Image (cartoon, rainbow, N blue to C red):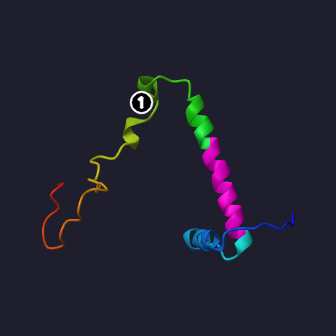
Amino acid sequence: MKMTMHIDEDVLDRVMKITGAKTKTAAVELALNEMARRHKMKELFSAGLGLTPEELKNSFDPNSYPESPEPVMLVAEAPAPHDKSDPAR
């Protein structure tokens, strides 16, 4: 469908860089699809799966869990210097 729209060029440029979209049309379509996907996810999470937290935990295969989870850097942590060991380990 062809239409005329007024879109902030800076925002459109950012979306194109973030998504790697080659055209403005592709960037707008990606942004709209992402918005629709997020809304659907929000609806699903709000509705729940009909399981209690314990039932949900038990519904996953324990063999799918990683053997030993890798430590992750929290936002407020400073990165470890390259010449020193990671304090999280």
Residue pictured at 71% horizontal, 69% vertical: 26
Where is mark 1, residue-wise? 57
Which quadrant would residue 6 be assigned to in this image? Answer: bottom right
Residue 78 rendering spot, x and y as whole percentages: 23, 62
Residue 51 rendering spot, x and y as whole percentages: 51, 24
Mark 1: few/some/many CA within 10 Å (<14, 14-19, 20+): few
- Span highlighted in magenta in the image: 26-40
**In the image, is residue 68 above or below residue 46?**
below
Residue 33 rendering spot, x and y as whole percentages: 68, 56
Q: Residue most toward the left?
A: 84
Instruction: Depth check: give the residue in front, 75 or 10.
Output: 10
10 lies left or right of 67: right
Instruction: Depth check: give the residue in front, 41 or 14.
Output: 14
Residue 10 rendering spot, x and y as whole percentages: 61, 73
Magenta segment includes 34:
yes
Q: Quadrant of the N terminus?
A: bottom right
69 lies left or right of 45: left
- Disc 1 residue type? Lys
Which quadrant would residue 83 be assigned to in this image? Answer: bottom left
Overall secondary structure of the magenta section: helix
**In the image, is residue 22 above or below residue 40?**
below
Magenta segment includes 58:
no
Q: Assign a secondary structure to mark 1.
A: helix
**In the image, is residue 1 above or below residue 58?**
below
Q: Quadrant of the C terminus?
A: bottom left
Residue pictured at 41% horizontal, 24% vertical: 54
**In the image, is residue 17 above or below residue 33?**
below
